Amino acid sequence: MDVRAQVSMVFHLDKCIGCHTCSIACKNIWTDRKGAEYMWWNNVETKPGTGYPTKWEDQDIYKGGWQKKNGELKLRGAGKMRGLVNIFHNPHLPVIDDYYEPFTYKYLDLIESPAMNDQPTARPVSLITGKPIDIKMGPNWDDDLGGTPDYARNDPNLQGLTAAEQEAMFQLERMAFFYLPRICNHCLNPACVASCPSGAIYKRGEDGVVLINQDVCRAWRMCVTACPYKKSYFNWGTGKSEKCILCYPRLESGQAPACMHSCVGRIRYLGVMLYDADKIESTVAGSKNDQDLAQRQRDMLLDPFDPEVIQAAKENGVADSTLKAAQDSPVFKFVKLWGLALPLHAEFGTLPMLFYVPPLLPVMASLSEVDNDEHAKNMDPVAKHWNDNWLYDTSTEELWATIDKARLPLKYLANMFSCGDESKVKDVLKKLMAVRIYRRWKTVGDIDETKAMAVLNDVDLAPETIEDIYYLTSLAKFDDRFVIPAAHREQAIEMLEFTGDAKGSAGFGVTEKPRRGW
Amino acid sequence: MMAVLDNFLFVGLPYASLLIFLVGTIYRYKATKFNYSSLSSQFLEGGNLYWGSVPFHWGILFLFFGHLIAFVIPHSVLAFNSEPLRLLILEIVAFIFGLITLFGLIMLLARRISNPRLKPVTNWMDITIEGLLITEVILGILVAYTARWGSSWFAAVLTPYLYSIFLLQPDIAAVSAMPLLVKLHIIGAYLIFLLIPFSRLVHLLVVPLHYIWRPYQRVLWNWSRRKVRNPATDWTITKPENN
Ligand code: SF4
Ligand code: SF4
């Protein structure tokens, strides 16, 4: 057993309000530079939708991630042979138009325009060429367009849904969407690392953050292809790839990453996960059908309270403070203890360490046909009168009826979070529902105790667990949501002294300006 | 007068380029490692690049190694060429590769010039190098056409000259007698060599062949995590064991 620590994350999708504050926080700190304008290390997508870059989930197009060939793991679009042969021209490299051409507006024209009969306009200009452009795409171009033909209907996750199911999904009355914030998953089996011919990308042993050494990157651009989440970006200005660094300078000083710190919906959790590094390959390679990958990944994560694990971790040099952080980790609770959070597209085989609590809301609110005139009679006269005859039914009359009659087909969610296995997503949604029913019994009181208890029984959760879930979901304070292990600055002298040996020349003390070469 | 010029071009220039090349590339690698990059522009324009980059790179690789082989093992090359048919085939293949390279270079230049997106990632050194390479390849093709059987006379005549340069006993009698085209081709080669440290050509020094032998995953530690707990070890001398 080779126990290692990984700083990992949980995003609770029911709580995301799609405000993009996270993206802005990240952009302002890290990617507000020439060549990086188009990059969103943190982006928030509307689902169903095509995402960023367009249709990134469709690996028939982008060739990212791992695949199994004769029981062996191979990179789909990169790798030793393919990477070196395709080094002069990478046939699977997305180009800037797959993201969008960055632009700005000539705001000064508004101010400096002479007096005219017409209003002056601020024309958009490309940030690459500096010339006026017709904007065809921009950041969050499909934001909130959850039902539109161009975006939602081209969502790669619709695979496996019958035409009728898809049709039903996009009926105006049933239409539902949710937000999917994405950052680099800091994977355990990162395809980006494996694909880099220069060996510029590495995973930090101490906390598992995946970084690109800017001094060693030579623009071979294989990582852009290999990362199935398209979270390694090519800086066209400097000729180097860049990616989310999980705000490691903030982490090392005990602060939450900027996107997480600023998250308005407080959907984000960060904590340590212990895992068995010996099992990385067998976990992915040994999966029979890709459907079990989410479960297999959960199995390779270790219980930080298990004495054997603690023992092995100590032998491996995992610090006591890190172990403590692992025990307090909200991620451990969501992922392992409660089984509420699932990895995004585990079938890509990179063992992503960012987990999602799938959204219950778009599933739950089902519609029933009622006579709204009748309905209005019971209402206060000032209440809005609806002309149509639909009623959103968010009551919890039957136990699981709303999940079974879900507005957003479970298959769709399963394609994203459990490699197509609907039962797994359903399992999670039932638990989330159970928490609601239980809390509703407690606080609102319109559900009787027998029903609340029946629900708990059904999902096999104790009332205390339910309270814990409720607390961490709804009430958790900053320090509950972010349990950041100490970076051990007391050992910083050694770190500083030998950073050069350990990592080429990146890290501390880099004095060279990141200027494009010639 | 001619002799002075020849001495300058075939003795002074090669030593100067060699020195500048060595000092320049090493200095640049040590001091400004960040800008050691192939500066790929595929991300801004991915389609036409294929028709330029691929033929150019494979072509120039073939030509480079062809010259290198004739330099390293001239006798084997001469022996190989002693059979006229083999010589003919070698020359034809090499000539075709020359044309492929030229085609690639022209496509690359056309792409650079015609696509406005590439302007912000193009500088005068890129154009200089591009021009030099095109000139050099055209010269090479002309030499191959006008002064046939270069694979043999290069090995027989120019290899000794190059050896004399490397052995620090320059003997330029043979080159001085060469036709003008050949002379120009040699000078072009020295100039390209000289400009390597000042251009994006440095990327050819960092071809990532070590990728073949490396394990796919790379995990780096700030310190040896197994030794960090043991106060008895003098771990300032402990290099981390990676992976
Ligand atoms: S999400 Fe992509 S860039 Fe991030 S570690 Fe995984 S493979 Fe690498
Ligand atoms: S800041 Fe939080 S709530 Fe807002 S979009 Fe980002 S993840 Fe969602």
Image (cartoon, helix red, strand yellow):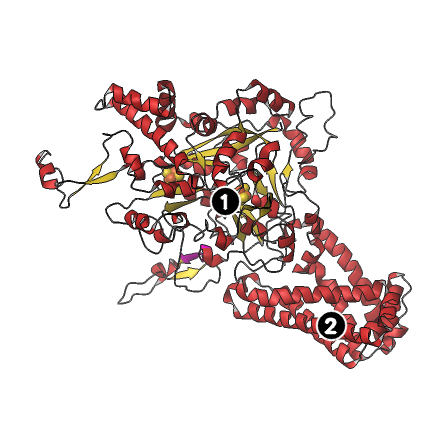
**Separation of marks 2 and 1 at Cα, in angstroms:** 51 Å
Q: Which residue is mark 1?
A: A30
Amino acid type, label 2:
Val
Helix, strand, or loop for circle 2? helix
Q: Residues within 10 Å of mark 2 (few under 14, many from 20)?
A: few
User: Which region is colored magenta?
Assistant: A99-104
Q: Quadrant of the C terminus of chain A?
A: bottom right
A407 over A221 or under it: above or below: above
The answer to which of A462 and A507 lies nearer the viewer is: A462
- The image shows residue B204 at horizontal and vertical percentages of 70, 58
The answer to which of A291 and B19 lies nearer the viewer is: A291
Residue A22 visible somewhere in the drawing: no
Residue under mark 2: which chain is it in? Answer: B
- The image shows residue A98 at horizontal and vertical percentages of 46, 56
Q: Are marks 2 and 1 in contact (CB under 8 Å)?
A: no
A231 over A459 or under it: above or below: below
Amino acid type, label 1:
Trp
The answer to which of A269 and B151 lies nearer the viewer is: B151
Q: Which residue is mark 2?
A: B93
- Taking A514 as reference, is A343 left or right? left
Q: Residues within 10 Å of mark 1 (few under 14, many from 20)?
A: some
Helix, strand, or loop for circle 1? helix
Residue under mark 1: which chain is it in? Answer: A
